């Protein structure tokens, strides 16, 4: 599929944020491990979360999938052997979380995925599991999937580095209540993407498990069982960042529902970022209102018009920003897109670990933005971007976040064609339709 994006002059309307991918993954796994029947309201059914749902089914969990909810008949932590290799497609979250959870199943479980997933580093998690009595190893002995996990989770003490992926930490925490003995986990070194671990602990406690923290980097879990419950998935700030950014770069007013002011999601910081760049944000209990700086409302920010190097007038009038995204690497594509159509220079730092996502996002964003005439410099841990984008032909590299971020650039420049754009379905299945509802000139071919 190809996504064609033309310049938008004014957008507006009320849309609902897609359900949180992060919370959907976690809710499915905890409901699977829980005792009793859980009802998960408003789950996200995307390529990634369906990988988790189907893996839970393969491990013996009965799940009834409906449009606006799913009913999960918990296993009480007594899983079955899947009897086949589990193909997790492109879902790195599923791979990491299942690597620990599969130790609760009999015999052994093999986890694999597509070509991209088989390049995701796993050795740090495998090393951290070993002292806990979990025998998990790379089938090709290269620290990459396929991963073989043998039955058994003894528990005990272990350490893990926090500088590559918070999902390693969450993986151990999510299944630790079902270890034979208590589990003590110490995070050493830099602790990047910490808010995602906060999300994990938040939902674990909502499903009845107590996580005892000593200091900021030590976690202790006694033997416990998750309890079934009704749980509503909140809106996803990561996916909503594209809607928020669209409202920020174009004239008009956008309201995004199902975004909560008390959310534990680290990507909520996108609101602060676009506000610092010049947009106006109004945050209510369960929704967010965004007004672009070009809005004629006299209460909004006044800004200068911006032009491309060839003199073409741009709708966006945001200004550059210096921002550290160490705790929110998934925002890199969104912020890089904003910076490419803003005035002045932006410095994005702290995202070296974004090189280990679906793609090396530091490099692929630099590569695609450079095709659009953006003046930038790629650093090991970020990007320096001077803006000046124009339209052109770009490639998604099979990364859902690149598709949606590059769409934002096209709304300002026009003349944008994004190849292999259907991968947006990984996290935001109806992204083009939602953008069209706001008045964005996007078309799928």
Image (cartoon, grey):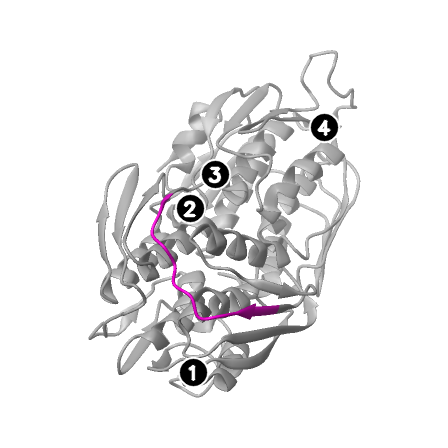
Marks 1/3 in contact by CB < 8 Å: the verdict is no
The first of marks 2 and 1 along the sequence is 1
- Disc number placed over residue 235 in the picture, else none: 3
| Residue occupying image coordinates x 36% and y 67% | 114
Residue 85 versus residue 370 in the image, above or below = below
Q: Nearer the viewer, mark 3 or mark 4?
A: 3
Residue 342, image x, y percentages = 72, 36
Prevailing SS of the magenta stretch: loop
Instruction: Name the mark nearer the viewer: 1 or 3.
Output: 1
**Quarter of the view holding residue 343:** top right
Tell me whether the residue at label 2 lies in contact with that at label 1, contact meaning CB atoms closer than 8 angstroms. Answer: no
Q: CA distance from mark 2 to mark 1?
A: 39 Å
Q: Which mark is residue 424?
A: 2
Disc assigned to residue 317: 4
The magenta region covers 219-230
- Residue 372 appears in the picture as rendered: no
Q: Nearer the viewer, residue 73 or 140?
A: 73
Q: Callout 2: helix, strand or loop?
A: helix
Q: Is residue 133 visible?
A: yes
Q: Is residue 362 depicted above or below 274 in this figure?
A: below
Label 1: which residue? Answer: 154
């Amino acid at each position: 599929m190809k996504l064609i994006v033309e310049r938008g002059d004014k957008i507006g309307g009320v849309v609902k944020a897609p359900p949180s991918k992060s919370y959907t993954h976690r809710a499915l796994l905890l409901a699977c491990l829980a005792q009793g029947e859980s009802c998960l309201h408003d789950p996200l059914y995307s390529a990634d979360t369906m990988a988790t749902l189907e893996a839970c089914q393969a491990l013996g969990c009965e799940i009834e999938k409906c449009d606006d909810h799913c009913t999960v008949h918990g296993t009480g932590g007594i899983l079955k052997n899947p009897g086949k290799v589990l193909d997790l497609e492109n879902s790195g979250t599923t791979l990491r979380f299942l690597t620990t959870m599969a130790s609760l199943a009999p015999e052994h479980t093999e986890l694999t995925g597509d070509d991209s997933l088989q390049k995701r580093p796993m050795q740090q998690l495998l090393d951290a599991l070993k002292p806990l009595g979990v025998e998990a190893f790379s089938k090709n002995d290269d620290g990459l999937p396929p991963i073989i996990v043998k039955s058994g989770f003894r528990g005990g003490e272990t350490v893990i580095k926090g500088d590559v992926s918070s999902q390693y930490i969450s993986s151990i925490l999510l299944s630790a209540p079902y270890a034979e003995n208590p589990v003590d986990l110490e995070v050493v070194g830099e602790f990047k993407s910490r808010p995602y671990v906060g999300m994990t602990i938040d939902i674990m406690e909502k499903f009845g498990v107590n996580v005892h923290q000593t200091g900021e980097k030590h976690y202790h879990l006694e033997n416990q069982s998750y309890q079934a419950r009704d749980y509503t998935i909140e809106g996803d700030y990561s996916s909503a960042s594209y809607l928020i950014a669209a409202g920020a770069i174009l004239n008009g007013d956008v309201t995004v529902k199902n975004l909560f002011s008390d959310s534990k999601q680290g990507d909520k910081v996108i609101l602060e970022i676009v506000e610092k760049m010049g947009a106006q944000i109004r945050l209510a209990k369960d929704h967010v209102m965004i007004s672009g700086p070009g809005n004629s409302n006299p209460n909004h920010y006044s800004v200068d018009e911006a032009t491309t190097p060839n003199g073409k007038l741009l709708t966006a009038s945001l200004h550059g920003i210096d921002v550290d995204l160490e705790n929110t690497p998934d925002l890199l594509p969104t912020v890089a897109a904003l910076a490419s159509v803003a005035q002045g220079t932006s410095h994005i730092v702290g995202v070296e670990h974004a090189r280990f996502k679906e793609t090396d996002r530091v490099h692929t964003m630099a590569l695609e933005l450079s095709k659009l005439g953006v003046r930038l410099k790629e650093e090991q841990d970020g990007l320096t971007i001077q803006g000046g984008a124009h339209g052109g032909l770009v490639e998604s590299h099979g990364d859902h976040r690149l598709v949606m971020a590059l769409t934002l650039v096209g709304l300002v420049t026009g003349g944008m064609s994004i190849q292999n754009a259907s991968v947006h379905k990984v996290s935001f299945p109806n992204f083009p339709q939602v953008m069209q509802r706001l008045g964005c000139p996007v078309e799928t071919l």
